[in-house]
Amino acid sequence: MQEDARSSVRSQPARPDVAAEQEATAAEPAFEHALEHAFEHAFEHALDAFDAWLRVERMVAKNTLLAYRADLLRFGQWLADHNIALTAVSHPTMSDYVVRLNADGLDARSIARHRTSIRQFYKFLVRESLAKTDPTRLLAPQRPARKLPDVLSEREVSLLLTTPDPATALGLRDRAMLELMYATGLRVSELVKLPMAAWHAGASGDAFLRVRGKGSKERLIPLGPTTAARLGRYVAELRTRLDPELVQKSLFLSQQGRAMTRQNFWLRITAYARAAGIRTPVTPHGLRHAFATHLVEHDADLRAVQAMLGHADIATTQIYTHIARTRLQKVHAEHHPRGK
């Protein structure tokens, strides 16, 4: 009797909702495969059409064709890996891909070639109505190669920052300015124009700067405890004494209680560099270069560095990855037994 009951239970059909779920689960691999096949087919179809247009209409050389195809196949694979359709590519997508190329170790010339290949590809797609918009149109134009700037080492920066004597009024102010510039990567024009209201110190000890840079774009830059303490001491001990009525809006003031100028700060920083015995050319912008390069050398995310520097395009920030690589190559050549 019990066996008959069990047989009856076993023979009962699965509930419709359970059966539907089992069927959907079984179909998932097939669906994923079909989706992947459709993506690859769409991309390859577009690429073949572009390839034919280059050969027939533009009569492009064979090596150029191969270079275009290799660049675009790499781009297509990256899109597939991220489940991004060819027609869904946006300007942020393109920026992310440029970051990926940089992370893969491509130099500036190779990245420029990839950008050109993708730009020509999308111009063709739009012209043939295979895409509605060109996501590369907002990418900043590739700048010609330029000489990498001399960058202060971390030791040289440390020497520079410790040269001003904080026991004196000028030393207290200048130490705070140098610390702040290296800690935030500010442009010198941004530094001397900082208003008192730009500095925010929270009750929990967190501090940050609200900076208005090029194009009146605003960005927030965090401050470490050392820099925040230097800045706080300057404000408490000197800034309030130079301008007790808070007539001036500027954070940093001269001995006469007026806003600091770029020229004044330039003279101060070059004098401190000489006093510290630093041979590398030192300028206010050099501290900005050092800030970015040292961040990249310590594996900071390039997007975060871009945001702190206030760069509109990631391509501008990429120069610091090339500086970091060049410095590593120099260290290897000078110190490794097989480097020479």
Image (cartoon, helix red, strand yellow):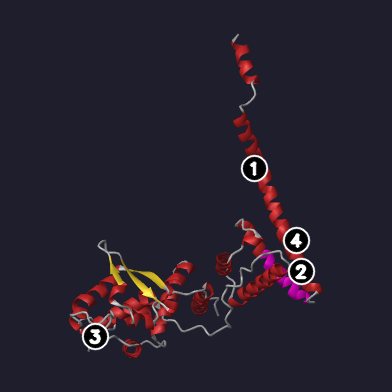
Task: State the residue position of label 2.
Answer: 51
Q: Report the residue marked by disc 1.
A: 28
Distance between mark 1 and mark 2 Cα atoms:
34 Å
Q: Circles 2 and 4: CB distance less than 8 Å? A: no
Q: Residue furthest top?
A: 1
Q: Amino acid at mark 1?
A: Glu
Name the residue at 23% across, 76% down: 235
> Would residue 315 appear left or right of 171 to someone viewing this image?
right
Mark 3: secondary structure: helix
Q: Nearer the viewer, residue 43 or 157?
A: 43
Quadrant location of residue 199?
bottom left
Residue 50 x, y percent position in the rendering: 75, 68
Q: Are marks 4 and 3 in contact (CB under 8 Å)?
A: no
Q: Pick the quarter of the image with the C terminus.
A: bottom right
Q: Is 73 a magenta residue?
A: yes
The answer for how far apart the CA atoms under marks 2 and 4 are is: 10 Å
Amino acid type indicated by mark 4: His
Query: Which residue is label 3 attached to?
Result: 170
Residue 159 visible in the shown view: no
Mark 3 burial class by Cα count in 10 Å: few <14, some 14-19, many 20+: some
Residue 189, how many percent across, how many down? 38, 83
Look at the numbered disc 2 and give the secondary structure of its residue.
helix
Compared with 25, 13 (above or below) is above
The first of marks 1 and 4 along the sequence is 1
Viewer-proximal residue among 196 and 231: 196
* Quarter residue 255 falls in: bottom left
Q: Amino acid at mark 2?
A: Asp
Q: Which residues are magenta?
A: 60-74
Residue 102 seen from this side: yes
Q: Nearer the viewer, residue 305 or 336?
A: 305
Magenta stretch prevailing secondary structure: helix
Q: Which numbered disc, 2 or 3, marks the residue closer to the eye?
A: 2
